[in-house]
Amino acid sequence: MKQKYLYHLLVALLLFAGACSTGPKNTKEAGDELTKPYTEKYRPQYHFSPDSAWMNDPNGMVYYAGEYHLFYQYYPDSTVWGPMYWGHAISTDLVHWEHMPIALYPDSLGYIFSGSAVVDWKNTSGFGIEENPPLIAIYTYHNIEIEKTGAIDVESQGIAYSLDKGRSWTKYEANPVLNNPGIKDFRDPNVIWNDEIQKWNLVLSAHDRVKIYSSPDLKEWQFESEFGFDAGTHEGVWECPDLFPLKVDGTDDTKWVLIVNINPGGPNGGSATQYFVGDFDGHEFIAASKDTSWVDYGRDNYAGVTWSDVPKEDGRRIFLGWMTNWEYANVVPTERWRGAMTLPRLLSLEKKDDLYLLKSSPVKELDLITNRAMTVKKEAIEVVGEKELDLHGINLNQSRLTFEFELGEKLPDSLGLTLQNELGEQIQFTYSDVDKQFQFDRTKSGDMSFSDKFSGIATAPYDVGSTLKLELFVDAASVEIFIDGGALVMTETFFNTQPFNKLKVFADGRPVTIAKAEFVDVISIWQLYSK
Ligand code: FRU
């Protein structure tokens, strides 16, 4: 009892501290005048989105001195993609974000495309001192002037450094540090310090493969090898790679994970994120299997990469993606801003027979905004056909829903969940035991007029056993569904014209038991704005 009280007190204190120190501030640099921000239609309440204007890929994700930095592809002058800048936000808890001034502006070498950032602990670059190590951003220059002449080799890599915890950035005067070898797509550098070779490694995407480089100082890069022209999926361009070591659950083994975004060519059309697991010695990446695996089977998780320099004591690999799809990202019906990020996710690696499975689960910090005071707990619900569940005042549109199904030996033909509003608009999530797949149906989800590519049913192959655990994070116009502890994830967006107020469970062919269900309100991370 006492423990429970202490826990609540701690959460309240953390929430209070979070609200005081990391709530968003009115930063003119990050957008124009604030009118009624963060309460607009479709505005996510606990996902990161820019105050105004266009955002795409997450960039430069790095942890330093108690702060998680999130940079992002940003076009401050419009709500459609354009000349790229790096926008910037900071969080101390991965949940509450403070908007910062724009970090990198386009210059004579080009737009600032995607890239990464690292802490140069040993000051190998010489930009700082070891007592105050520089933060280094490594990004792509995309030169539109050269492109206009018809040339294809318009992308090169540049660096910039910060000596004041990411507040201001100076571009290296000898940029670019990595010149284009004569190819069209040559971008999205991602850097990691490699203890084994005592050098930096850089991986970047080169059209249909990734290229790997090494450097002693982040300025001079040496080509090492390439991976992928004969591996994975090739229906689109490879973009935004990330390469990092990860421990295999329950063992002392470490494997290297290579994330490669691809657009188009995803499992449900358009943009998606594939991964390979293998070995890396600082020179060459050897995949255990050349087949593609997907980080997320939903249609709305793209360009995701992971944070660098999370302290060893913490040890987490934390992933975050851009929550949309290039098929319609430029036309979704938001007005003041366009683009939101997924929730930060903890990655883990499981070995199943000879295959490695990359699992994602929501980071534990989300408990800070999980309003346990508004929790509906349900024990053992029997579902025959379809059943509407009592929400006891929970706001479905800003909620966290957990279900534990007990299915026994034989499963119904299909089972699932429907979220619906008074107009009959709905999203439906189904497991079909006949097809051995999950299905996310947004064909009746509301406004779909902006693109003929938006509607439709996304599917994900899966074999449900005698139990099934689902965790859903619903936030305005998106849902992230974590299945069986993140063994499979689906991230989907939708634009219902009125809020959802009905939650239904269905089972076709056989009754099912939900052993436990929990519905929880999630607290807005932008509440300071709404005051
Ligand atoms: C991925 C991407 C990157 C590129 C950036 C441009 O969404 O196309 O390859 O660097 O967006 O904004």
Image (cartoon, helix red, strand yellow):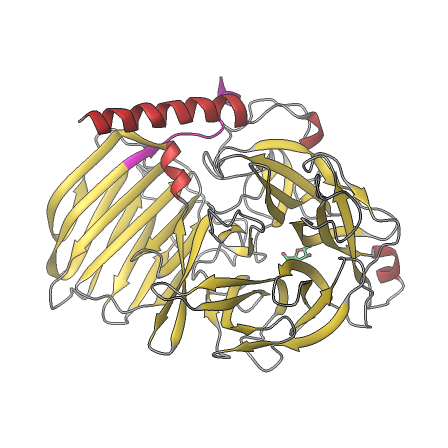
Q: Residue at x 72, y 34 (%)?
A: 164
Q: How many marks?
A: 0
Q: In the shown orientation, is residue 415 left or right of residue 153?
A: left
| Magenta span includes 49 | no
Horizontal side of residue 392 vs 38, given as left or right = left
Foreground of the two, 96 or 11: 11
Seen at 71% across and 62% down, the residue is: 187
Q: Is residue 506 visible?
A: yes
Question: Up-down: is 468 above or below 170?
Answer: below
Percent position (x, y) of residue 171? 82, 46
Quarter of the view holding residue 368: top left
Quadrant location of the N terminus in the rendered image: top left
Residue at left 76%, top 58%? 217
Quarter of the image where ligand 1 sits: bottom right
Residue 173 vs residue 23: left or right? right
The x, y position of residue 33, in whole percent, is 67, 23
Residue 527 seen in this snapshot:
no
The image shows residue 250, relative to residue 417, as above or below, that is below
Q: Which residues are magenta?
A: 520-531
Q: Picture coordinates of residue 176 (x, y %)?
A: 84, 57
